[in-house]
Structure formats: structure tokens, C-alpha cells
Amino acid sequence: MYKKILVPLDGSGFAEMALRHARAIAECFDSEVIMVRVMVSPFTLVSPEMVLAGDEEQMQLLRQHAELYLKGRKGEVCQEGIKCRAIVLEGPIARTIVDFAESEGVDIIVMSTHGRSGLDRWVFGSVAEKVIRAASCPVLLIPAKE
């Protein structure tokens, strides 16, 4: 039923809570876990139209950090005998997750919420909410717990 499981990770402990659930599903269905980390240039948060000097160097450093992080998570998952891949993507976070899921034929997206509310939620938005609204496959949300 769930042959491909997509797990978006951002490096936080909250996001990694979803990985535990994805691993359990993968064991039950002999699934592949695909971990992704979506990079967004910090400069686009300030001004998406403005190209700033150093943006490419900063993105390269962010990419290296993301690849190293995913390599570690991939090692943990693969060590359990679960098929897995780890991919770094770039773009608007929610849209990139949804587009990737569709292009890969993902059967389910397993992700955590970050438990933001109030001003933080208004400023940063809810990636999980945007993914649920746009995804064509089921989305399993793992609530953030301190």
C-alpha cells in the first residue's frame, strides 16, 4: 500500500519525530523511505527579487550542511535494513515537497508539525498546512511535542 514514503526534514528534533513513524510504516509495508531537505536562500526571505552578493556561496554552504545532515539520517535508516534515499532540494518549501512527491509517485508524506501559533505562525506560515492542501497523496502529520 505504501511503497514510497516521503519524509521532509529540516534538521529539527520536531521534524525527526516523523522519521520514527515513517520507519515503522516502512517496516510493515517493505517501503522505501525518501528523506528530503528543502533549502531556501535566506536572502529570498528578505527580498525574493533582490540578488545579493554571496548568495551562491551561502547556498553552497547550506547545501553541504544539508547533505551531511541527511547522510547521517540515511545511515541510521538504512542500517535497519530499510530502503532509503536522501535528497536535497531547493525552492519554496511546501510547493517543492508537493511537486517532488508527485514527480516521484510517493504514496504518503509523513511529516511533523512545529507547533507554531500566534505571530510565529502568521509570519512563517504552516508548511504542513500548505502541504495538506496541495498534496495529491495522503499526509500523516505527527504533532510537535516538547
Image (spheres, grey):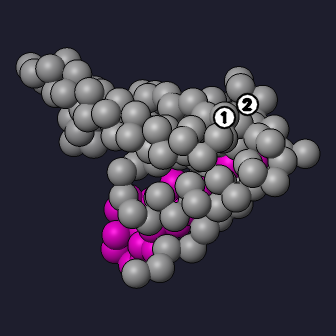
For label 2, the residue is 102
The residue positioned 44% from the left and 29% from the top of the image is: 88
Residue 70, horizontal then vertical, whole percent:
41, 37
Is any atom of residue 93 visible in this view?
Answer: no
Q: Is 106 positioned to the left or the right of 39 in the image?
A: right
Above or below for 139 versus 79: below
Of the residues shown, which amino acid type is indicated by label 1? Lys
Residue 111, label in figure: none
Q: In which quarter of the image is the N terminus?
A: top right
Residue 13 forms part of the magenta stretch: no
Q: Is 56 positioned to the left or the right of 8 in the image?
A: left
Instruction: Give the camera-side residue of 89 and 121.
Output: 89
Q: Is 142 positioned to the left or the right of 12 in the image?
A: right
Q: Is mark 1 on a helix, strand or loop?
A: strand
Residue 83, label in figure: 1
The residue positioned 46% from the left and 38% from the top of the image is: 75
Q: Residue furthest left?
A: 53
Q: What stretch is highlighted in magenta?
A: 107-127
Above or below for 123 versus 10: below
Is any atom of residue 42 visible in this view?
Answer: yes
Of the residues shown, which amino acid type is indicated by label 2? Glu
Residue 87, horizontal then vertical, whole percent:
49, 28
Q: Is 75 positioned to the left or the right of 4 in the image?
A: left
The residue positioned 75% from the left and 51% from the top of the image is: 27
Residue 98, horizontal then vertical, whole percent:
64, 38
| Labels 2 and 1: the sequence-earlier one | 1
Residue 25, horizontal then vertical, whole percent:
75, 55
- Local crowd at mark 1 within 10 Å, few (<14), some, or many (≥20)? some
Q: In which quarter of the image is the C terminus?
A: bottom left
Work out how far the residue at label 2 is from the one at label 1, CA to CA, in angstroms: 19 Å
